[in-house]
Amino acid sequence: MPSYTLRHANPAKTRCDAVVVGLVSTSKGAVVAEGGEEVAKAYGRKLRPLLVTLGATGKAGEVVRVPGGEVLRAGLVVFVGLGKPERGGAVSPQAVRRGAGAAARAVTNAASVALALPAETPEQLRAVAEGYALGGYTYTTYKKAKDDDVQGHPGEVVLLSPGARRSDMQAVVDEAQLVAEAVARTRDWVNTPPGDLTPPAFADAVVEAAKEASKGRGVRRVSARVFDEKELLAMGCGGILGVGNGSAAPPRLVELTYSPAKPVAHLALVGKGVTFDSGGLTIKPAASMNEMKSDMAGAAAVVQATLAIARLKLPVKVSTFVPMAENMVSGSSVRPGDVLSMYGGTTVEVLNTDAEGRLILGDALVRATEVEPDVILDVATLTGHMVVALGDKVAGVMGSDEVVADVLAAAETAGEAHWHMPIPEAMDERIHSSRIADLSQHDWIRWGGGLFAAAFLREFTGGLPWAHLDIAGPAWNSGGPSGHVTFGGTGWAVATLVDYARSLATDAG
Ligand code: BES
Ligand code: ZN
Ligand code: MN
């Protein structure tokens, strides 16, 4: 993570290796965005023809580099496109976040960088800090340190903002850094090869992370409890055990609790932790299996969000439930036709072993109801149907209307795209269509599979306020980096969950 210094200074007079300036695209061509005015002034009339010659348009993600020369104290100017400004000329926080992310990848060889992007409002400043930190994310654990493509990062990053002297602005930067850190650690876990992140290894890593996060000054301890396969058997967690049974690595359930002194609300989080999804006996085609190490992205997100909420000292109690299993093929795999008895006693007829997420989540959701939270949110890479419906950059949200609305509002401030999907009444009949068990896990009707899955999960929420985030699309980026989103695990939902907890704190407080 970069360490930031927040300053109100003239970017044209700031000594550094590179200064980053935004460009917006207008009907008159590329125009320097807020925050870069002094740099534009230093260039004077020469700037516009220079930008034209360079072919700069200001479109989102565009990067154009110019030597600072005699005009600036910086050796290099990095102009980064922010797209079209909003009406009135302002740049939206999301455009700033994306631009800062692209800029981070354009300055990897500079020792010191000044960011002169739009950062007048707290929302913009937060976006600069988060976007820059995340856009420069790399995952190099498995690379030789000196490989050419493993790049360095500037040691010193100065955030320039006209509001720098206001105390709330420094807090915004500290919080942004903390959230970006949580997102980056989520990406690390999602990017880890599945053979190295089996359920027992993942559980150990979560316990370790909880210990580490509890070290901060004045942070209340996040307690962690791990249930192994013997304890899961004694508890009757048939969903987690059923899915985990085909793997040489046994399943786990991890429960975290963050209990602030005076909580104003109690939030329960549940995350799908399938460390690898081969599909089981209903095996996936090769191409669909490639990215299935990312099937624990929901688990990683709820854990890291919990730790971030604790480190932010938000007055919201958080109880987090993380079922972990590896969905594999072997002589002991669960079969289509098997009936599993879930935690709490509901029986489920398994008809497609590739619809495993709902099985492990069912157990964990019932556990969550037992702590009597005000609201439950579950996060899961649950269905390819949601990817078909919304594409790979938008998550689907289903559940209680009020909770869904609050999640969408949080997602908006967090800069993550979510969309409300329905749970049609007809799904109820479909999930109750088993002739031999209480519920059908699957019915081979393709249409609305993501909504069927949500209806199935709802059966385990005890009627509590609840929302389900299907992040199967946006949890993994198989394309090139774009804005603050890099290749591989994206850390999706962490920022939304943190902002949701913030909204609980302010609404109730
Ligand atoms: N982990 C997958 C869902 C998924 C698909 C995540 C694509 C990320 C990208 C899930 O366990 C799964 O296999 N779902 C099935 C459900 C079906 C069998 C009802 C699917 O989407 O095909
Ligand atoms: Zn899965
Ligand atoms: Mn599956």
Image: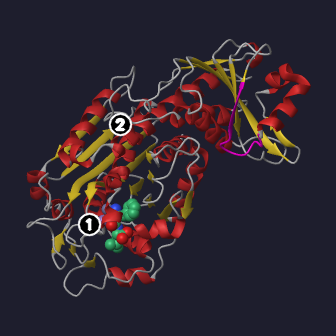
Observer able to see residue 421 = no
Q: Which residues are magenta?
A: 56-66
Query: Quarter-wise, where is residue 183 in the image?
Result: top left
* Magenta highlight on residue 57: yes
Counting from the top left corner in percent of width and height, residue 409 is at 59, 52
**Disc 2 crowd, CA 10 A, few/some/many (<14, 14-19, 20+):** many
* Mark 2 CB within 8 Å of ligand 2: no
Find disc 1 in the rendering and name its residue.
Answer: 279
**Ligand 2 lies in quarter:** bottom left
Dot 1 and dot 2 residues touching (CB under 8 Å): no
Q: Quadrant of the C terminus?
A: top right
Residue type at mark 1? Gly
Counting from the top left corner in percent of width and height, residue 276 is at 26, 55
- Comparing 156 with 208, the one in front is 156
Counting from the top left corner in percent of width and height, residue 29 is at 84, 43
* Magenta highlight on residue 332: no
* Mark 1 CB within 8 Å of ligand 3: yes
Seen in the image, is 334 located left or right of residue 456?
left
Comparing marks 1 and 2, which lies closer to the viewer? Answer: 1
Above or below, comparing residue 451 to residue 419 in the picture: below
Tag 2 secondary structure:
loop
Q: Earlier in the sequence, mark 1 or mark 2?
A: 2
Above or below, comparing residue 63 to residue 238 in the picture: above
Tag 1 secondary structure:
loop
Seen in the image, is 488 located left or right of residue 158?
left
Counting from the top left corner in percent of width and height, residue 416 is at 56, 50
User: Disc 1 and disc 2: Cα gap in Å?
Assistant: 37 Å
Q: Residue at x 44, y 80 (%)?
A: 447
Query: Quarter-wise, where is residue 462 in the image?
Result: bottom left
Find disc 2 in the rendering and name its residue.
Answer: 259
Seen in the image, is 21 located left or right of residue 334?
right
Q: Residue at x 35, y 26 (%)?
A: 145
